[in-house]
Image (spheres, rainbow, N blue to C red):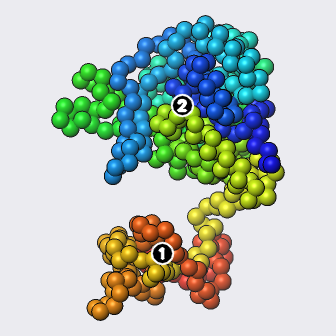
Amino acid sequence: MPNLESNTAGIVSPNPFWLASAPPANSGEQVMRAFDHGWGGAVWKTLGQPIQNVSSRFGGLHYKGTKAIGFNNIELITDRPLETNFKEIYEVKKRYPKHAVVVSLMVETEEEWKDIIKRSIDAGADGLELNFGCPHGMCERGMGSAVGQEPTVNEKITSWVAQYSTVPVLVKLTPNVGDIVPHGLAAQRGGAHGVSLINTIKSIIGVDIERMVLEPRVGQRSSNGGYCGAAVKPIGLHMVAALGRDPRFRLPISGIGGVTNWRDAVEYILLGASSVQVCTEVMLRGYRIVEDMIEGLTQYMRDQGVEGLEELVGRALPSYVDWGDLDLNYETVAKIDPAKCIGCYDCVVACQDGAHQCIFPAEAGQPRVPRVDESECVGCNLCQIVCPVPDCITMVEVDNGYAPATWNEHVRAGAKLRPKKGAH
C-alpha cells in the first residue's frame, strides 16, 4: 500500500490534500467534517483584525453549459471573533492530532504579528501561512497582495514572523506579478520554511449588461475580486514550476490553483509541490471529493511503482526547459482514425480558419472522413483539441532525418537550422 503521508516544511499530514484558506475552512465544525471525509490538512480561513464582509460576494464564469469553470470572490478574511477561532482551532487539533492544522494570518504591525502568532501557536497550530496574496479589500489597507507584490516588504514581514514563530512558516504568494521567482526568493531570505501558491488573481468576473453593474453586485456597485477555480490551474502550475526549477530556490511548496481531482493534484506534485490545497471545487462539490482524490492518487502510485509521495515530488521538472532549448527538428503530424471519426468536420473548420490549412473534407463519393495533407501539417495539435471523439486524432512522430537541434545551440554555434514548416 503506497504511503500518502505528506511533509511540507515540517508540517506532516496523512495525505497531501489540504483545504485552502477560504470559506470551507472557516470554522471548527467545518474542518472536523472535512477531516472525517479524509482531508489530510486544513489552512484556516485568514485571521486578522475584525472586518465586515459584503453581500453579494461570489461570482461564477459559466461556459457552454458548464457552471463555474472560473470563480470570483470579493470576500475578505474571517469576520468571526478571534477568540472563537482560537477556541475552535484548539478543539480541532485536540480531536485530530495527526492532521495538519495551519493558521493563515494577515495583520499590519510587528506587534500585531507577534501577538497573533503566539495566540495561534498556543491554540495548537502546526504551521502558519502568511496571506501575502489577497488581491482585493485588504491590499487597499496595505496588506495581502500589497505585501506580496513588494519583495522587500515580503522579506521584512516574513523575517518578523520567522523570529517569533516556533512552528513552520509558509508564505502564500500572489500571482499578480510578472515573475514569481523574486517573490519566492524574498520569502526564502526572510526565513520562511516554505511557500504556498497561487493565491487568487485580480479580476472582474463579469458585468450585468441590463443593470450595467459589475458582478457580483453589491447594490448598484461592485469591485474587482480574486479569480480561482479550474480555469486558473495553468497559471498555478507555471508559477509552482518556475520556483521548483530555479536552483536558487530551496523551499518546499504547497501547490494551489484549480485542483479539481487527483490528476490535477499529481500535476502539481510532479512540478515540485509536496502538498496541494483545494478551495473552489470543495465550494462547488463538497468535502467528499477528497475520497476520489485519495483513491486516484493511491492507484496512480501503485501503477508507477512508487511507495512514498516524496518519490513523485518534482519528477516532471527536468522536462521544463526554456523555449530555446526545445528540439526544432522534432516533428509530428495528425492521423485520423477512420473507424472512430464521426464526420463532424470540427477539425476541418479549425484547421482551415485557425491553423495551417492542411485538413480537408473527404473527396466526393468517399466516406466522410477528413483528409490530412501531411506535407503541410505542422503538428500544432489544434485538430486533436477540437475533436469530440477520444483518441480519434493522434499526433504521430515523424522521422524526418534531421538531428535534434535547438535555437540556443544555433545562437552559440552560429550554425544554420532547418526552418520548420509553417514557421514565421
* Disc nearest the viewer among 2 and 1: 1
Residue 237 appears anywhere in the view:
yes
Q: Secondary structure at mark 1?
A: strand
User: Is 185 above or below relative to 43?
Assistant: below
Task: Report which residue position mark 1 lands on.
Answer: 393
Quick one: which residue is furthest to the bottom in this view? 365
Which residue is rendered at x = 77% and y = 39% of the image? 5
Image quadrant containing the C terminus: bottom left
Q: Earlier in the sequence, mark 2 or mark 1?
A: 2
Which residue is rendered at x = 51% and y = 20% of the image? 77
Q: Position of residue 245 (x, y in %)?
A: 69, 52
Which residue is rendered at x = 68% and y = 18% of the image? 92
- In which image quadrant can residue 277 be found? top right
- In which image quadrant can residue 399 be found? bottom right
User: Is 366 above or below relative to 89?
Assistant: below
Q: Amino acid at mark 2?
A: Gly
Q: Position of residue 229 (x, y in %)?
A: 48, 41
Relative to the observer, which residue lies in front, 373 or 252?
Answer: 373
Q: Which mark is residue 161?
A: none
Q: Secondary structure at mark 2?
A: loop
User: Is 274 above or below relative to 408?
Assistant: above
User: Is 56 above or below relative to 300?
Assistant: above
Task: Report which residue position mark 2 lands on.
Answer: 133
Q: Amino acid at mark 1?
A: Ile
Within 10 angstroms of label 1, few (less than 14), some, or many (20 or more) residues? many
Relative to the observer, which residue lies in front, 251 or 93?
Answer: 93
